[in-house]
Amino acid sequence: MTTLAIDIGGTKLAAALVDENMQIGERREIPTPGSQTPDALSTALHALVAPLVQRATRVAVASTGIIQDGNLLAINPRNLGGLLHFPLVSTLKTITGLPVIAINDAQAAAWAEYHATGRKGEDLVFITVSTGVGGGMVCGGTLQRGYGGLAGHLGHTLADPQGPLCGCGRKGCVEAIASGRGITAQAQDDIAGQDARAIFALASGGHSQAQRLVERSARTIAQLIANVKATTDCRLVVVGGSVGLAQGYLEKVRAYLAQEPAVYQVEINAARYRHDAGLLGAALLAQGEK
């Protein structure tokens, strides 16, 4: 059976046909609509999946935000163009005419990366550093979703009580400091308005402010990992996302974590499935992988 896997992110929407061996066939991407209306997201999803749906037997969606009773609830609406609530499962059932499951994208990625390790039974935490900062946890071989779908939203833990206001309404969240959107929002003077990719390039070229922003992001993620280790005693942390996988970033995170006491040290790996972890994790869940 072929799964139409969909990944809804703050910057892009991706869809791919995934077979039972977890091999990705045809893959498509379009930008996430900037509009605040549900109709804009519905239209974009229809355009994304239309060329693929006839070859699929089911749909699996990995999305930023909280998935609750088939609805997408945006904990930080800025990451979805201001969209706060969207009937995700029912919309895609209408568009495709197929069975649909939906899960948070970082939870899905955690499930894919857990299976990729081959280390069954070892607790794993996945952290994505991208437009936002998200997370997923596998404990005792079970993916943690939480009563209301909130489990793993590590980006909305506190990093700095005096830090910038996060889109979720809290002040000083990890996401507000370390994410691509957070890095961009903190940029001032000659790099104000630059996106995260440009700021990383400037940092590599020696721009002092850009370097400070990247270093602050990496240090904040290292502190988050130390907190995660203290909370879960996990054996492995996997980092993904466009920022997390940027050249040299993970080395910075490891270096900052190495400054913490030994009890907070934990193995950190880059996501094996890179930017497709969410797609593959959702497909695995659709297949009923245990």
Image (spheres, helix red, strand yellow):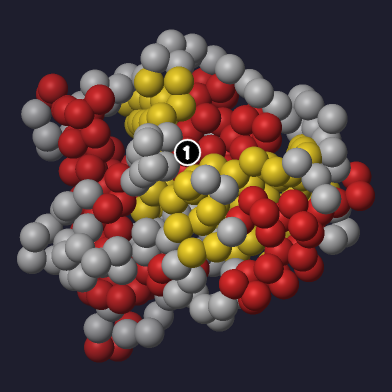
Q: Depth check: give the residue in front, 161 or 184.
A: 161
Residue 40 in which image quadrant? bottom right
Q: How many labels does the image show?
A: 1
Residue 193 sits above or below residue 77 on the image: below
Residue 199 sits above or below residue 233 on the image: below
Q: Residue 120 at what x, y percent from top left?
A: 49, 12
Residue 61 sits above or below residue 173 on the image: above
Q: Is residue 160 left or right of residue 204?
A: left
The residue positioned 47% from the left and 38% from the top of the image is 107
Q: Which amino acid does label 1 sit on?
A: Gln
Q: Residue 2 at what x, y percent from top left?
A: 83, 35
Q: Is mark 1 on a helix, strand or loop?
A: helix
Q: Residue 122 at what x, y percent from top left?
A: 40, 14
The residue positioned 37% from the left and 53% from the top of the image is 133
Residue 268 sits above or below residue 241 on the image: above
User: What quarter of the picture does the C terminus occupy?
Assistant: top right
Q: Is residue 208 left or right of residue 63?
A: left
Q: How crowded is mark 1: few (under 14 residues within 10 Å), some or many (20 or more)?
A: many
The residue positioned 63% from the left and 47% from the top of the image is 61
User: What quarter of the picture does the N terminus occupy?
Assistant: top right
Q: Can residue 248 be seen in this view?
A: no
The residue positioned 64% from the left and 51% from the top of the image is 89
Q: In this view, does 242 lie to the left or right of 249?
A: right
Q: Residue 284 at what x, y percent from top left?
A: 65, 29
Q: Mark 1 points at which residue?
A: 107
Q: Depth check: give the residue in front, 132 or 208.
A: 132
